[in-house]
Amino acid sequence: MTTTTSEVEAPVRSVLICGYGLMGRGIGNTFAGAGFDVKVRSSRADALKGTRPDIVFLRELPETPPDLILELVPEDIETKRALFREIEARYGDADFLLATGTSGLDLNVLAEGLKRPERLIAIHYYMPAESIPLVEVAAGPATPRAAVERAAEALERTGKLPLKMYKPVVGFIVNRLQHAILHEAYWMITQGIATAEDVDFAAARMLGPRMCASGLILQKDISGLKVNRDAQRAIVPHLFHNNEPNPLPGALFARGETGLAAGKGFYDWAGLDAAEVRKTAARELEKLLAFLNEQTFKNTAHLQPKPRELKP
């Protein structure tokens, strides 16, 4: 998964971030802290000036294109496309990577209308961006592997662990897995089979720890594929298969029960300090990741098998 600087042509040295919300601040800090030349284009540039001496804040696109432009504007296809058009009109055929921070939009659709679609990649961080080590890097429909490698190498220099995809897929790897599990979880909750607490208990006390120790697929090799084959045959036909989002989260949202900030969502948060809850959750995750890195991942590195190319 690691790419050395010597293997990458024209390593990324300069970064422009378009959009400076909570995610943008975290990402900007990681690049600036690693010594990159960082600029931020924001409508709030005047108010942000001086908040970080190692980041330049601008209201307009700079005259010279950076090596990497990362958009973090609202998750709307037309909003992102409008920014892409502005960037391409400004910089023409200059050599830079055009990255989207989308978590769920289709890269095939986002690439439509681009003059240079081979520049398009996705760089998907997770909250909090400064402390979560994994970042997904995905190719657009016309993007060469070299562009993915170039971006991944830059992320490694900021201390991140890039997960590389050379084909576009909606949701990338982590969110596809997450939403497959959530889809089944929401169905069980709506059917009265399990509560939200039951689902979280199972995830936190069983699924999460076991995946930390031995991943998802590797565990099946350890357990034995006959057991897995038999379980697939018995369980998969009974899973809830459809192509529609579960209505429960949407119904909660429509009622204004949007989660922690609103005081209620799947849980009742009344009387709890939202800022303290978020701060504690981020801190505990950082502690867990540090423990896993020092006490689990390093200790089992010598027992990791070699990957294989698989055919059905």
Image: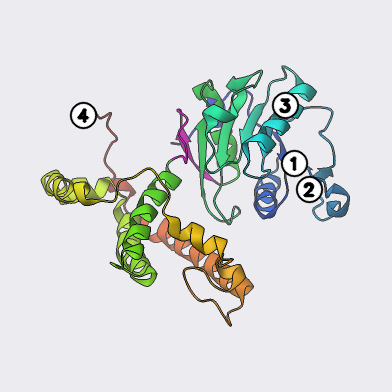
* Crowdedness near tag 3: few (<14), some (14–19) or many (≥20) residues, C-alpha within 10 Å: few
Q: Residue at x 82, y 51 (%)?
A: 53
Report which residue position mark 4 lands on: 312
Question: What amino acid type should be assigned to the residue bearing mark 2?
Answer: Asp
Camera-nearest label, 3 or 4:
3
Q: Could you give the CA–CA distance between mark 1 and mark 2, rounded to whole angstroms?
A: 7 Å
Report which residue position mark 2 lands on: 54
Asked which secondary structure carries label 4, the reply is loop
Residue 115 x, y percent position in the rendering: 66, 18
The chosen color scheme is rainbow
Q: Nearer the viewer, residue 186 or 174?
A: 186
Q: Could you give the CA–CA distance between mark 3 and mark 4, rounded to whole angstroms?
A: 42 Å
Residue range (magenta): 160-172
Residue 309 x, y percent position in the rendering: 28, 28
Considering only order in the chain, which callout, 1 or 4, is on the residue closer to the N terminus? 1
In the rendered image, the quadrant that contains the N terminus is: top left
Check contact, mark 4 vs mark 1: CB within 8 A: no
Asked which secondary structure carries label 3, the reply is helix
Question: What amino acid type should be assigned to the residue bearing mark 4?
Answer: Pro
Q: Which mark is residue 38?
A: 1
Question: Main SS type for the magenta part?
Answer: loop
Q: Could you give the CA–CA distance between mark 4 and mark 1, rounded to whole angstroms?
A: 46 Å
Check contact, mark 1 vs mark 3: CB within 8 A: no
Report which residue position mark 3 lands on: 85
